[in-house]
Image (cartoon, grey):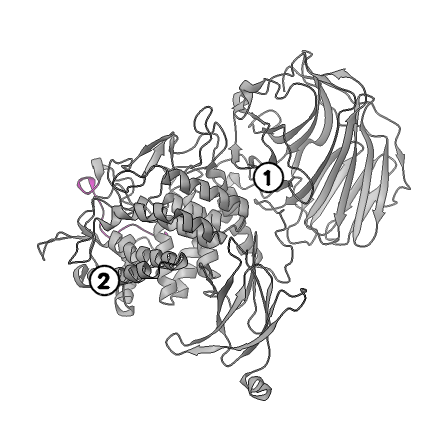
């Protein structure tokens, strides 16, 4: 902060409680709860997950081991760490000195909790008392600060947090801001908007150098603690790097006045007129979680767990989710246009520029994938962000029922960047709305929003031939530059899934007749695709009706995998798999087509997507493999290569090469592959499926697993005890749970709302399905309370009870 002079805080004599004999340092591989301090005012609080070190009036180091084994990683703080200081408008080079304190007091020293207070951090003008508390098995420690201005004085008082991770993310009360590697001219973001969470992760390099293996997570909104207002975010490749600054006292905020609010700009020197007034007081509480991986570890990530997801799966899930799709949200004021706050989502994070700059809210299917990942965080805040993005596009349905393909700044555009008209935006936007309603449980919203969704479906209905029951379309479903039209496999295969999903939504809002008609239409389109678009061993690109022999065919992998997911029978699916699995580029999940789309086959000769792999195709590949039980290809050909890339890079590029490497010519820090990895883990491997009035847990591969994300808890252990908890949503009603596979002829006790009075217990037996050759457990229970499913013995138990 050039041009600022910081008043050095006076050093007081330190009055300590009895000092510890052992060294004041983190002790590797010691998972016991420890408190160590010395006569110089240094202290350490440590358990197996976190170790923090203080020096008088500052916190200088926070290290973490997410596994809880005290194998601590790098310090997640930088420079001076966490300090309190005063700023003035005096000229000269900035001088930053650590805070000073009068005393360190041990407040609690038990086997389950340690707590210290650093007394009078500050000087004769302003000071705080800091209380630091750590529990034995906690991922987080609690930082409490209570302070006041003791005498009138010029300048401002701030508490500064200097972070080592490079990319900063902030959750305000209704918006998200993210930044990586900002230039000095745009390194500060001041806001008066209440702030509930700040986290930072990753490193400032590119490609493999972006893996930081460290993160810090601050949570302000919890219990009775208010969200924080009057704050600065900091992001810079130089100077003091990434950080967070809390404005505590002083009449001028932000320093540059209203003109510097809610935008990335240079943080100016405090105004000469800024003054701190005696008697100004405050009290703040922050939960702080550190991590030795690139994802935020706070917000009760492990709270209530008796079992855990395999560590590698959890690390990759969280890194993919909180590193990429969260950072693509551009929902804060001024993010898109000065003086406006709109709900947009970008294809990339800010680093500091964004790929496809000025273009947002692509549902072709980009934002369908990104919003699905955000929804499956099961974080109510992020789910609400998705709702805002969905409604933003819904506000601009045109007279044809067409959804904007994307926005250029704030202007809706109905054609793709290639100027082609696609079916994808309408189809995937509506499916995204259904995803929101199901994952949030917000059926009241779905009921109110259904007229708009029906209106948008007109654009697709109007393409369906009344006799053929196939859609004749103007362009590609989800690869805009590929010239496809007439009766195409990609759109028609997707419409089978689309109308089945629409039918389920109509059922959920009480329109049984509409649901029945939609299911009939889905069945008719499925028959039409099979009858007219199948040739030899795959579905063709397009049929140019009315000529029965006029076909155009590139052996599209995207279209055929869509068909294998929703249309094909087992015999045809196996033929498709043999064709694709015998083709080229097997190391890249998943290639676009067997036959190359040349300049004459693409819009304006754009062959940029003709030789690459796409995350969206990998998604439908995975759905098809799950449908027909091809676990080996799913695990080894799709999921594992993508997980390895995320481990090696944290952020990923837009496309992959034939050998499975990232295509360095494509956009950096792109949302798609990380979002798809979240979807593959949540929906396919762990099989957590939330419907409107049904919830199914059907893992593909794992026999047992645990998943704790936001408001959702699943511990699937069918041989012993399964624990389930899902949010109640807008309608606290019973849902049907389906758990599979479970042991055949097994008996389970179902306990609802354990710990509540009159909690009912029921006993249910598993049901064998000869078609799938497995047993399922099906029962009704309310959402909201914890549901505990305990295996009893066998059917013999039921006979004895009767």
Which residue is located at x 63 percent, y 41 percent? 216
Q: Which residue is mark 2?
A: 524
Select label 1 or label 2 by which is in front: 2
Q: Nearer the viewer, residue 491 or 748?
A: 748
Which residue is located at x 23 percent, y 54 percent? 489
Q: Which residue is mark 1?
A: 199
Position of residue 48 in the picture relative to residue 581 (left or right): right
- On the image, the x and y values in percent for residue 711 come to 57, 53
Q: Based on the displayed image, in which of its 4 quarters is residue 202 positioned? A: top right
Quadrant occupied by the C terminus: bottom right
Which residue is located at x 60 percent, y 33 percent? 194
- On the image, the x and y values in percent for residue 99 come to 77, 28
The local crowd at label 1, few if under 14, some if 14 to 19, many if 20 or more residues have their Cα within 10 Å, is: many
- On the image, the x and y values in percent for residue 165 come to 59, 37
- On the image, the x and y values in percent for residue 128 come to 78, 30
Label 1: state its secondary structure. Answer: strand
Q: How many marks?
A: 2
Q: Based on the displayed image, in which of its 4 quarters is residue 601 positioned? A: top left
Q: Is residue 431 above or below residue 698?
A: above
- Residue bounds of the magenta highlight: 587-602
The local crowd at label 2, few if under 14, some if 14 to 19, many if 20 or more residues have their Cα within 10 Å, is: some
Quadrant occupied by the N terminus: top right
């Amino acid at each position: 902060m050039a041009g600022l002079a910081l008043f050095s805080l006076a050093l007081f004599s330190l009055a300590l409680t009895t000092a510890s004999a052992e060294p004041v340092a983190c002790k590797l591989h010691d998972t016991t709860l420890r408190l160590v301090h010395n006569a110089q005012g240094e202290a350490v609080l440590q358990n197996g997950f976190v170790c923090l070190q203080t020096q008088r009036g500052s916190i200088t180091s926070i290290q973490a081991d997410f596994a809880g084994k005290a194998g601590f990683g790098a310090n997640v703080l930088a420079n001076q760490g966490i300090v309190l200081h005063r700023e003035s408008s005096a000229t000269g080079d900035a001088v930053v000195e650590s805070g000073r304190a009068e005393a360190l007091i041990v407040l609690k020293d038990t086997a389950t909790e340690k707590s210290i207070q650093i007394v009078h951090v500050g000087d004769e003008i302003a000071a705080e008392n800091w209380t630091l508390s750590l529990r034995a098995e906690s991922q987080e420690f609690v930082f409490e600060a209570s302070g006041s201005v003791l005498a009138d004085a010029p300048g401002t008082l701030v508490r500064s947090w200097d972070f080592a991770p490079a990319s900063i993310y902030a959750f305000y009360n209704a918006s998200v801001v993210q930044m990586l590697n900002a230039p000095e001219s745009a390194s500060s973001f001041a806001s008066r908007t209440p702030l509930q969470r700040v986290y930072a992760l990753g490193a400032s390099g590119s490609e493999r150098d972006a893996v930081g293996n460290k993160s810090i997570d601050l949570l302000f909104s919890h219990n009775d603690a208010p969200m924080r207002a009057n704050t600065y975010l900091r992001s810079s490749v130089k100077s003091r790097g990434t950080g967070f600054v809390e404005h505590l006292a002083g009449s001028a905020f932000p320093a540059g006045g209203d003109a510097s609010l809610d935008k990335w700009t240079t943080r100016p020197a405090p105004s000469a007129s800024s003054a701190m007034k005696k008697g100004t007081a405050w009290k703040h509480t922050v939960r702080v979680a550190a991590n030795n991986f690139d994802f935020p570890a706070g917000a009760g990530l492990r709270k209530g767990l008796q079992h855990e997801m395999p560590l590698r799966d959890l690390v990759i899930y969280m890194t993919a989710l909180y590193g990429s799709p969260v950072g693509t949200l551009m929902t804060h004021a001024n993010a898109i246009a000065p003086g406006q706050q709109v709900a947009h989502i970008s294809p990339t994070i800010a680093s500091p520029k964004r790929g496809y700059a000025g273009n947002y809210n692509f549902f072709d299917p980009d934002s369908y994938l990104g919003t699905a990942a955000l929804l499956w965080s099961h974080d109510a805040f992020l789910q609400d962000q998705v709702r805002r993005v969905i409604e933003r596009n819904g506000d601009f349905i045109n007279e044809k029922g067409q959804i904007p393909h994307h926005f250029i700044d704030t202007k809706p555009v109905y054609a793709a960047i290639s100027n082609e008209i696609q079916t994808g935006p309408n189809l995937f936007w509506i499916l995204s709305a259904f995803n929101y309603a199901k994952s949030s449980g917000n059926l009241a919203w779905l009921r109110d929003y259904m007229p708009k969704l029906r209106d948008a479906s007109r654009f697709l209905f109007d393409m369906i031939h009344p006799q053929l029951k196939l859609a004749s379309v103007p362009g590609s479903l989800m690869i805009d530059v590929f010239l496809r039209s007439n009766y195409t496999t990609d759109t028609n295969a997707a419409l089978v899934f689309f109308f089945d999903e629409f039918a389920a939504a109509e059922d959920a809002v009480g329109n049984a007749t509409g649901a029945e008609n939609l299911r009939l239409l889905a069945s008719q389109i499925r028959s039409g695709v099979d009858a007219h678009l199948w040739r030899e061993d795959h579905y063709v690109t397009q049929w140019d009706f009315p000529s029965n022999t006029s076909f155009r065919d590139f052996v599209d992998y995207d279209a055929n995998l869509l068909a294998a997911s929703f249309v094909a029978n087992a015999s045809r699916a196996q033929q498709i798999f043999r064709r694709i699995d015998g083709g080229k580029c097997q190391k890249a999940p998943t290639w676009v087509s067997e036959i190359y789309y040349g300049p004459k086959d693409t819009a304006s000769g754009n062959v940029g997507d003709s030789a690459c792999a796409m995350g969206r195709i990998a998604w439908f590949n995975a759905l098809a493999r799950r449908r027909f039980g091809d676990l080996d290809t799913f695990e080894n050909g799709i999921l594992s290569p993508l997980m390895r890339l995320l481990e090696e890079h944290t952020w990923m590029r837009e496309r992959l090469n034939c050998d499975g490497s990232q295509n360095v010519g494509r956009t950096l820090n792109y949302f798609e592959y990380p979002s798809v990895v979240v979807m593959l883990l949540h929906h396919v491997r762990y099989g957590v499926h939330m419907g409107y009035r049904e919830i199914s847990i059907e893992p593909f591969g794992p026999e047992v697993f645990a998943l704790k994300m936001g408001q959702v808890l699943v511990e699937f252990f069918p041989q012993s005890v399964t624990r389930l908890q899902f949010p109640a949503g807008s309608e606290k009603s019973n849902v049907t749970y389906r758990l599979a596979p479970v042991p055949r002829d097994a008996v389970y006790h179902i306990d609802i709302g354990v710990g509540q009075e009159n909690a009912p217990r029921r006993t249910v037996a598993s049901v064998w399905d000869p078609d799938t050759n497995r047993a399922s457990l099906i029962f009704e229970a309310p959402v909201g309370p914890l549901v505990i499913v305990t295996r009893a013995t066998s059917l013999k138990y039921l006979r004895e009870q009767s």
